Image: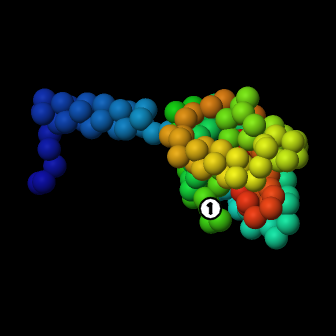
Amino acid sequence: MFDAPVETWYLWVGLAVAGTAAVGIAATLPRAPPPDAAGAADTVDAVAASDHAATGVHPLSVDAAKVGPYRLWLRDDGATGHAAFGFGPVTPVRPDTALWDVLRGTPPDRAFGAPADLRRAAAAARNRTPAWRRRERLTVRRVTWEGVDVTLVG
């Protein structure tokens, strides 16, 4: 016979260890899939690839989002999803800046004195380290002004 007797202590200890390991593995699995960063990145790419000035909005239902010049991260309930932009670099925009005003609809010639000022502000925004921010929607605007072409994301 190749069966182990049911009365052996090491059989019960082995089953207890295997059961504990299975419960531990199940407890560490994520409860929900990561947020859909690809859908938000597709919205950014659609606006960035446009031949004309365009605006797009993508609703977000996440705890926080982080936007970089080439990538987007979304975080919700401990899970993080990310996607790369196909048409980059984009310009991440922080609130309470002149770029924020342009993203929200202000013409660039009213927010900046000259196209070179817009170009410098966009370059500085792309060089900042991305930070997690609470966002309910992702707004994208492509702006072209006298040779300066930027895609603002905030």
Q: Position of residue 75 (x, y in %)?
A: 58, 37
SS at mark 1?
loop
Work out whether residue 114 can be spotted: yes
On the rendered structure, is 127 left or right of 24?
A: right
Q: Is 146 located above or below residue 21 in the figure?
A: below
Give the residue type at disc 1: Gly
Residue furthest to the bottom: 51
Location of residue 147 (image quadrant): bottom right
Work out whether residue 80 can be spotted: no
The residue that appears at 62% across and 38% down in the rendered structure is: 65
The residue that appears at 75% across and 37% down in the rendered structure is: 98
The residue that appears at 81% across and 58% down in the rendered structure is: 145
Taking depth in this image into account, of 113 and 125 the one nearest to the observer is: 113
Q: Position of residue 97 (x, y in %)?
A: 72, 33
Label 1 crowd bin: few (<14), some (14–19), many (20+), radius 10 Å: some
The residue that appears at 41% across and 35% down in the rendered structure is: 28
Q: Which residue is mark 1?
A: 88
Taking depth in this image into account, of 151 and 12 the one nearest to the observer is: 151
Q: How many marks?
A: 1
Q: Position of residue 113 (x, y in %)?
A: 79, 44
Q: Quadrant of the C terminus?
A: top right
Q: Position of residue 64 (x, y in %)?
A: 62, 33
On the rendered structure, is 39 left or right of 24?
A: right
On the rendered structure, is 144 left or right of 125?
A: right
Q: Quadrant of the N terminus?
A: bottom left
Location of residue 101 (image quadrant): top right
